[in-house]
Image (cartoon, coloured by chain):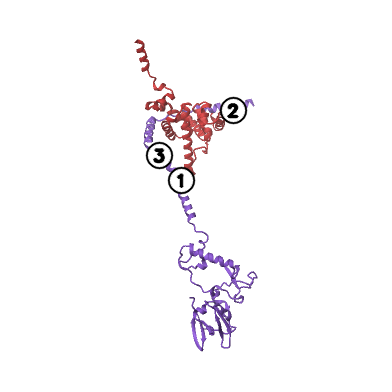
Chain colours: A red, B purple
Amino acid sequence: MALDNVGNQFTEVSVPERDLSDHALIEATKKGDESAFGQIIARYRNPITNYLFRFLNDYEEAVDLAQETFVRVYFAIDRYHTGFAFSTYIYRIATNLAISELRKRKRRSLFSLTGLFQADGDEGAEFQPVDTKPLPDRNLIDDERERVIAKAIAALPPKYRLPIILRDVEGKSYEEIAVILELGLGTTKSRISRARGLLKEKLKHYF
Amino acid sequence: MRQEENNRIIADENVAKLLRALPRVDSPGDFEAGVRARIARGAGNAGSASWLFSLRFALPVLLVAMISFAAVGVFLTRPDESASVAPAPTAAPTAVPEITEARPASTAFAPSTDDDRPPTVVARNTAVQAVSRTERLAAARRDVAPAPKGFSTDQTVRGPKTVIVPKGVDPTSGNVSVPEKDFSTSAPLNVRELLSFMGIEGERSEAGWKVKSAAAGGIAERSGVKAGDVIEAVDDRPLTDGSPVSGFTFKSVQVLRNGTRVRVQLRNK
C-alpha cells in the first residue's frame, strides 16, 4: 500500500517547461500545448532577432523576420523531424527568410527610380573609413565603433556575411554553421576565413 | 612563413573579438504577442493565401493556353492555297466572247516600250494551259467563298501574267511582248483577221468585203450575218482594204444584203 502511494507521487511530478529540451517542447506544441510554443519563442526570440539584425543591419526588419520565422515554425511544426537540433532548424528558416528579403530589396531597388539615386545598403554599400580623431566621450567612441563594425559586416557579400555572423556573433560551431547554411565543412571554414580577411582590412584601426 | 601564418591567425582572432564584443540586440517586449497575432491571421488567411498563390501560376498558364488555342484556330481556318489567291465572284463569270481571249497575228502585237517586266510566255492552245485553267476555274467556283462585286473569276484564277502567242510563233524568240496598254482598243488589225474573230470567212470582192461563210455558232452567225452579205462598216467605221482597224470588241456591223443596208447588232448569246 505504501509502495503504491510512492508510485502515485512519482507520476504527479512534472518537469517545468523551461527545463524541457527543444524536442520535448516541439512534441508538446504538436499536441496543442500553446505554452510550450511560448517557451520556444522565449528561448530563441533574442538570438534570432540578433542574428537577423546583424545580417540585415535593420532592427525593424530583423524583428519582422524573426516573428515570421516563428510563424513558419509553428505552421510547419508537424513536418519537423528530430533528426537534427532545433536550433539548427530555426536558424535555417531565419537564414532563408533573410536571403529572400535581400532579394526583395534588390528587386525593389531595381524597379524603383528613387533607388537609382540611393545607396544600396547591401553588398554594394560604400564603406566609410574610420574617423581617427579622438572623441571626448567614451560612449560616443563605442557607438562609433559599433556603427563602423556593423556597417563593415553589412558591406560583406551575403555568402561571407552569414557564416561569420553565425560563427563570431552567435558563437555557433563550424559543424552547426555547415548544417544551417547547407554547405560543406571545408567551404564553411573557407568562407569564414575569407570574411575575416575582408573585415581585417576594414577594421584594422580598431585592433 | 610561420610568422605570416601567426600574424594571420592573430588578425583573425582580433576580428572575432571585435564581433563578439558587439552588443546583443534583444527583441521587443511585444514580440510574442506579434507572433501570436500573425499565427491567428495566418490560420484564417491560409485558404486565401494558397488561392492567391495558385492564381500566380494559373493566370500565365491560362494566357498561354488561350494564345495557343487562337493560333491553332487560325491555322485550321486558313484557306488553302488555291482559294487564297483572291476572292471569287458570287456569280458565274459572264460569257466572254472568244474574240476577247484571242490574240491577233504577230503583226497585231505592238512592242511594249514602258514595261520592263519579263512576261511569262506560253504557247497558245497548249493542252497543259487549257487543263490548268479549267481546273483553276472549277476550283474557284467550287471552293471560294462569295466575294464582293468587282472581281473576275477569270482574273482571279489566271495566275501569273501570261502571253498567248499564235501558232507558229516562237515564244522564246524575244520578239513577242505584251503591250501594257489595253490592247482591246489599241491593237491594229487587218480586215481579214477582224472578220475571222467574228466567225466570218471573208473575201474581197468588187462590192467590198463579202461574207463567204459564217461559222456555225460564231458571233456573226448568232447575230444574223449571212453568207453573201457585204460588210461595209464595223462600228460605223468603214472597211477599206489595207486600213487597219483597232480593237477586238465590236458592237455592230453594217452589211449590204440584197441591195439593202442592214445594221446587225452583234450578240454574245
Residue B61 has which mark? 1
Pointer 3 indicates a residue of which chain? B
**Mark 3 to mark 2 CA distance (whole Å):** 51 Å
Amino acid type shown at disc 2: Arg
Residue B8 has which mark? 2
Q: Are marks 1 and 3 in contact (CB under 8 Å)?
A: no
Q: In the image, is residue B150 above or below residue A98?
A: below
Expressed as whole percent of the image width and height from the top left, the position of residue A141 reads: 48, 30
Q: Nearer the viewer, mark 3 or mark 2?
A: 3
Please check whether the numbered discs 3 and 2 fall on a single chain.
yes
Amino acid type shown at disc 3: Ala
User: Considering depth in this image, is B67 or B28 the residue closer to the camera?
Assistant: B67
Expressed as whole percent of the image width and height from the top left, the position of residue A175 reads: 53, 26
Q: Nearer the viewer, mark 1 or mark 2?
A: 1
What crowding class fits label 2: few (fewer than 14 Cα within 10 Å), some (14-19), or many (20 or more)?
A: some
Residue B49 has which mark? 3
Expressed as whole percent of the image width and height from the top left, the position of residue B155 reads: 52, 68
First reached walking from the N terminus: tag 3 or tag 2: 2
